[in-house]
């Protein structure tokens, strides 16, 4: 995978412009400061907060992640493994709660990478 792609910055907590600076302060979604972001890229200075309330719409991206996760796990657990629906629903709620920080961070990186294109390798 090219290090200068949107997918790289989304998956590896990197700036969508330069792919070098970290997007979130912590690299782990399961740390105390999982939601702390840099205001600007520590490497290139790209503004991570283009306008107030910019990340409000990333809530819809995380909603899509929850929905995709629920549909995939439903297909695997209930349809493929033929496990009772009640057990699936009992297990679904805790996993969604545990995945909340991960989807929160992923949704913000996806949302910002829609609006900021990566620098080409020749311009670095
Ligand atoms: Zn950067």
Image (tube, rainbow, N blue to C red):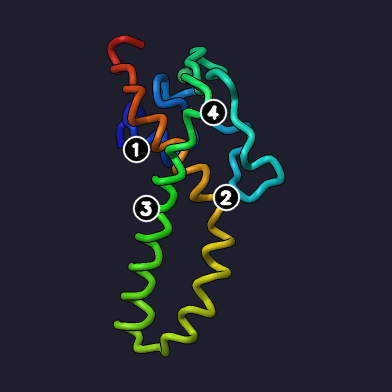
Estimate the spatial distance between the alpha carbons at disc 1 and disc 3, rounded to whole Å. Answer: 17 Å
Q: CA distance from mark 4 to mark 2?
A: 17 Å
Residue annotated with mark 4: 22
- The kind of secondary structure element at disc 1 is helix
- Counting residues from the start of the chain, the first of labels 1 and 2 encountered is 1
Q: Which mark is residue 85?
A: none
Residue depicted at 36% across the width and 75% down the height: 74
What mark, if any, has residue 7 been given in the picture? Answer: 1
| Quarter placement of the N terminus | top left
Residue hosting label 3: 64
Between marks 4 and 2 in the image, the one whose residue lies nearer the viewer: 2
Residue, disc 2: 101
Q: Is mark 3 within 8 Å of ligand 1?
A: no
Nearer to us: label 1 or label 3: 3
Q: Earlier in the sequence, mark 4 or mark 3?
A: 4
In x, y percent, where is residue 60? Answer: 40, 46
On whether ligand 1 comes within 8 Å of the CB at mark 4, the answer is no
Location of residue 38 in the rendering, given as x and y in whole percent from the top left corner: 59, 25
> What kind of element bears circle 3?
helix
């Amino acid at each position: 995978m090219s290090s200068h792609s949107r997918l790289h910055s989304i998956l590896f907590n990197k700036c969508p412009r330069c792919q070098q600076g970290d997007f979130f302060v912590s690299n782990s979604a399961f740390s105390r400061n999982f939601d702390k972001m840099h205001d600007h890229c520590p490497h290139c200075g790209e503004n991570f907060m283009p306008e107030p309330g910019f990340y409000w719409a990333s809530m819809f991206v995380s909603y899509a992640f929850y929905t995709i996760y629920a549909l995939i796990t439903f297909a695997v657990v209930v349809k493929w493994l033929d496990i009772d629906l009640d057990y699936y629903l009992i297990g679904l709620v805790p996993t969604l709660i545990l995945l909340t920080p991960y989807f929160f961070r992923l949704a913000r990186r996806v949302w910002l990478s829609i609006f900021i294109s990566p620098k080409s390798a020749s311009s670095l």
